[in-house]
Amino acid sequence: YIGLEQEKESVDDLLETYAEGAEAAGTFEIDGVVWQRYDGPGKSVTLVQETPDVTTLVTTSTAPLEDLETLVRRLTAS
C-alpha cells in the first residue's frame, strides 16, 4: 500500500491527518528534488514536498522505500 495525497494544506496538517506519529528523519532526494522524510510507527515512511501551490505526501507502512521512490518519479507537475 502507498498513499498519495495532494492538498493545499501545510505539511504539519497533512502529517497529522495521514501519518500520525511520524517524526522528521532528514531528507530524501529523488531526481534532484528534495523531499522531507518522516518515519512513523512500525516501518512506516512518509515523504513530503511543499510548494507554493500544493503539498504532496506519499506514505506507506508496507511497501519498501524503493516503491515510494518509483511512485514519486512517476508524478508530474501540471
Image (cartoon, helix red, strand yellow):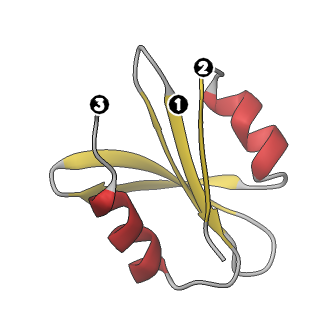
Residue lying farthest front? 78
Q: Which residue is mark 1?
A: 55
Mark 2 vs mark 3: give the one in front.
3
Quadrant (top left, top right, bottom left, bottom right) of the N terminus: bottom right
Please report whichever mark, 2 or 1, sits nearer to the chain's N-terminal start: 2
Task: Give the SS element for disc 3.
Answer: loop
Mark 1 vs mark 3: give the one in front.
3
Q: Position of residue 78 (x, y in %)?
A: 29, 30
Q: Amino acid at mark 1?
A: Thr
Q: Pointer 2 and pointer 1: residues touching (CB < 8 Å)?
A: yes
For the residues labelled 2 and 1, the Cα–Cα distance comes to: 6 Å
Q: Amino acid at mark 3?
A: Ser
Image-based side of 48 in relation to 30, left or right: right
Identified at 39% across, 47% down, the residue is 35
Residue 22's disc is: none
How many labels were placed on the picture? 3
Q: Pointer 1 and pointer 3: residues touching (CB < 8 Å)?
A: no
Residue lying farthest left? 32
Residue 8's disc is: 2
Q: Is residue 13 above or below residue 63?
A: above
For the residues labelled 2 and 3, the Cα–Cα distance comes to: 15 Å
In this rendered view, identify the residue nearer to me: 1 or 28. Answer: 1
Q: Which residue is mark 3?
A: 78
